[in-house]
Amino acid sequence: MGEIAENNMGNMNDEQAGVFFEMVRSELGLDLEFGITPTSPSICLGSKILICENDLQYPWFTKQMILHEITHHLIPNDHTHGSSFHKKYAELVGIFLGGERG
């Protein structure tokens, strides 16, 4: 997979999204697969997350979608986006999008 360009303000492609996913997956030590789907919405299906082609947008948006679906993997019984989901999602955003890494 290719590198994510630092100054890329255009849409992420599937390869760039995969690079970001792999970096997060590796750092968190997750046994999780990644794919792109033409159907909506983006979704976590147990050990695989699928990002909808329509969510391959600006890098910040696509990265948030990937982190959102990874959060569903980490908090599997919180389908209502409750407080435990929000806490874990905010933690991931802080780690992977905050500061110099964003």
Image: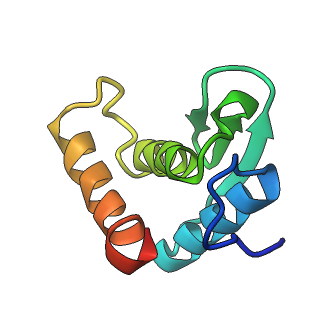
Left or right, residue 7 beside residue 39: left
Residue at image x 58%, y 53%? 59
Q: Is the C terminus in the top left, top right, bottom left or bottom right quadrant? A: bottom left
Give the mark count: 0
Visual colour scheme: rainbow
Residue at image x 62%, y 61%? 21
Left or right, residue 1 beside residue 90: right
Left or right, residue 30 beside residue 84: right
Observer-nearest of 9 and 17: 9
Residue at image x 81%, y 26%? 38
Q: In x, y percent, where is residue 75?
A: 35, 45
In the rendered image, the vertical position of residue 31 relative to residue 46, given as above or below = below
Q: In x, y percent, where is residue 24?
A: 53, 69
Q: Is the N terminus in the top left, top right, bottom left or bottom right quadrant? A: bottom right
Q: In x, y percent, where is residue 32?
A: 62, 58
Q: In the figure, residue 91 lies in which quadrant?
A: bottom left
Q: In the figure, residue 83 lies in which quadrant?
A: top left
